[in-house]
Image (cartoon, grey):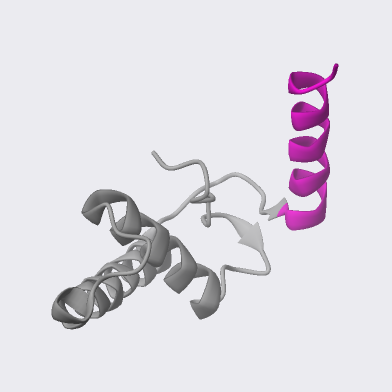
Amino acid sequence: MCRNIRTLHNFDPPASDEEIRAAALQYVRKISGFAKPSRANAEAFDRAVHVVAEASAELLGELQTAAPPRDRDVEADKARARAQRRFAA
């Protein structure tokens, strides 16, 4: 999985449409190998991003969990701490 794609399920507030689209864009970029498609491939690329975003939003809407929602700020702090330990000189 691409490291730039973040978990979007079970957060308070829920993932926004923008976050879902950004994850879809990263996914399509990863599998296509294009950061920015050529004009010849732009329509197919954009259509794929749209379809993946719709499927992701549907999935996130249907997932259920008994766990309490996670806080984005707390999770970001944890990620920064992990990165600091990982890349400490």
Where residue 59 sits in the image (x, y, percent)? 33, 62
Q: Is residue 60 magenta?
A: no
* 83 shown above or below 18: above
Which residues, given as a range, are shown in magenta?
A: 71-89
Where residue 16 sits in the image (x, y, percent)? 56, 75
What count of labels does the image hold? 0
Taking the image as shown, residue 46 lies to the left or right of residue 16, namely left
Q: Residue furthest top?
A: 89
* 61 shown above or below 88: below
Residue drawn where x is 37% and y is 61% of the image: 35
* 20 shown above or below 34: below
Where residue 15 sits in the image (x, y, percent)? 56, 68
In front of the other: 38 or 11: 38
In front of the other: 26 or 11: 26
Residue drawn where x is 75% and y is 54% of the image: 71
- The quarter of the picture where the N terminus appears is top left
State whether the magenta stretch is mostly helix, strand or loop.
helix
> Residue 84: which quarter of the image?
top right
Taking the image as shown, residue 49 lies to the left or right of residue 12, namely left
Q: Is residue 83 magenta?
A: yes
Residue drawn where x is 43% and y is 42% of the image: 2
Taking the image as shown, residue 79 lies to the left or right of residue 25, namely right
- The quarter of the picture where the C terminus appears is top right
Where residue 83 sits in the image (x, y, percent)? 75, 30
